[in-house]
Image (cartoon, helix red, strand yellow):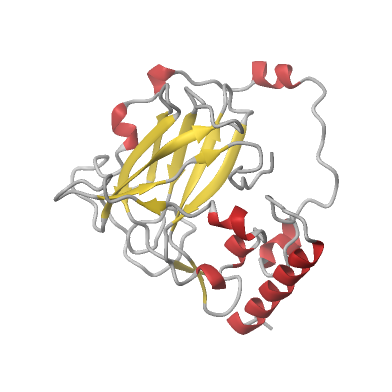
Amino acid sequence: MIPTQRDISALIGVEAARHRATGAVRHHPDRRYPPYRSSELRHPAHPLVTVADPDAVELSGPVFGVTDVTELDADLTRQHAGEPLGERITVTGRVLDRAGRPVRGQLVEIWQANASGRYAHQRDQHPAPLDPHFTGVGRCLTGDDGGYRFTTVRPGAYPWLNHTNAWRPAHIHFSLFGTAFAQRLVTQMYFPGDPLFAYDPILQAVTDDAARARLVAAYDHDLSVPQWSLGYRWDIVLDGPAATWIEEGR
């Protein structure tokens, strides 16, 4: 039987209470988190494989350079002949290390649903309209101050099959690379005030309140552009006590 939202919310409460009982600060969720049902089937059951020679992996893997990334790649509203539908937004922030120092020259990639909550992907069967002027992918390199900046549209919430009446809050996926494709971190950025936060087992899988809050961007009115876009600011901290939760671990 497919669980209801009430069932999933009860499980989320159990997991939150279990975390509080430990009295520990945890920045990363368990790989098996029962309210997120997919993790029951596909979470790693064996220890991670240690790569004996990481340098050798990077020597045989693909690489990228500054010439591969153009300014247009960071503007998801200009990748087609027409304007995409939806609320135009600017998303910016900095990539920082644990000491607050900028991390320069990092490849930052994003992907997201369109304003109706549908991905431009053949496996997305959500019956919301596709936008012919929006593919939902972009990339840029961080500057000397560790900064990144994207122009896009605010993604919509969308349903998924975790349980009955399951909806994902609006979010943007982020991927960060170091100096090679073998150094990849993946995470998600959410929007402030979303009423779906409490119902989403993926976001709630981060059981530490402070760590979960760091996944939510801040609205910045000074960043909003008159007659053009609303501004959101979101810093990504790669390590340390203020680290941003990263899906693939650190």
- Where the C terminus falls, by quadrant? top right
In the picture, residue 170 is in which quadrant? bottom left
**Residue 129 x/y as whole percent:** 31, 64
As drawn, 8 above or below 209: below
Nearest to the observer: residue 13 or residue 23: 23
Q: On the picture, is 241 further left or further right than 150?
A: right
Nearest to the observer: residue 146 or residue 157: 146
Q: On the picture, is 234 further left or further right than 210?
A: left
**Residue 82 x/y as whole percent:** 18, 47
Identify the residue at image location x=59%, y=30%: 99
Q: On the picture, is 100 further left or further right than 147?
A: right
In the picture, residue 85 is in which quadrant? bottom left
**Residue 56 x/y as whole percent:** 72, 17
- Where the N terminus falls, by quadrant? bottom right
**Residue 71 x/y as whole percent:** 30, 28
Nearest to the observer: residue 75 or residue 241: 241
Identify the residue at image location x=40%, y=56%: 113
